[in-house]
Amino acid sequence: MNAAEGQILHQWSARKIHPVVMVYVVAVFLVFMALSRFVFHSPAAVKALAVAAFGAIVAMIPSALGRLEYRFTPSGLERRPLDRKKPRDFEEVFRWQELSHTISLKHGFKYYLRMEDTGPVRRFWRTHISDEYSGEFHVETDDRETVAEILERHKSPASPT
C-alpha cells in the first residue's frame, strides 16, 4: 500500500457496458434481418446476420457482467477490475496535477490531461485518437454527484454536454 492509499476520498464500482446496450444491438440486427428477409428475400443474409448478432452479443457479455472498481485518492484516480476472490492492485488513471479538465458524459466522465504541445494536429491526435492524454471513467447514477463534487474540489470542474 503506498502513501496515497492511506486515505480514500471516494470509492465506487461501475460496469463497462450496461446490459441494455446488448438489447439495442439485438434490435439493430433484428431490423436488418427483417429487411433482408422481406425486402431483399435473402435467407442467406438473414442467417449471416443472425451469426453476426450472436458473435456481437457473446463478445459483449464480459463487459456487461464485469465491473471496474474506481477510487479517488489524494494523488488522483485509480482503477482495477472488481474481483472479490483475488483482488488486483489498483493502477493509476491520472494524477490531480496532470488533469486539465473533465467533461460529463451519460455513463461517466471524460478526462483530459495537460499537455505542452502547441501544434493543432498533434494536440488532436493526442487527445482524440491516442489515449495518451485523454480517457474516460465510468460512474453510475448513485455516485455521480459525489464524483462531480470531488472533481470540482480538485480544480477540475465537470462541463455538462
Image (spheres, grey):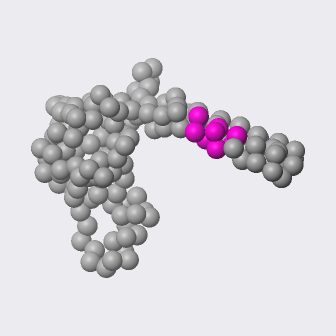
136 in relation to 116, above or below: above
State the quadrant of the N terminus: top left
- Percent position (x, y) of residue 33? 75, 44
Q: Is residue 91 visible?
A: no
- Percent position (x, y) of residue 87? 40, 27
Q: Is residue 7 visible?
A: yes
- Percent position (x, y) of residue 120? 33, 77
Residue found at x 58% / y 39% = 24
- 27 inside magenta stretch: yes
Q: Quadrant of residue 138?
A: top left
- Percent position (x, y) of residue 16? 46, 38
Residue found at x 23% / y 62% = 114
Residue found at x 34% / y 57% = 134
> What is the magenta segment's predominant secondary structure?
helix
User: Farthest front residue?
Assistant: 39
32 in relation to 27, above or below: below
Q: Is residue 68 left or right of residue 141?
A: right
Q: Nearer the viewer, residue 18 or 77?
A: 18
Residue found at x 52% / y 31% = 19
Q: Is residue 70 left or right of residue 47?
A: left
Q: Quadrant of residue 124?
A: bottom left
Give the magenta range: 23-30
27 in relation to 82, above or below: below
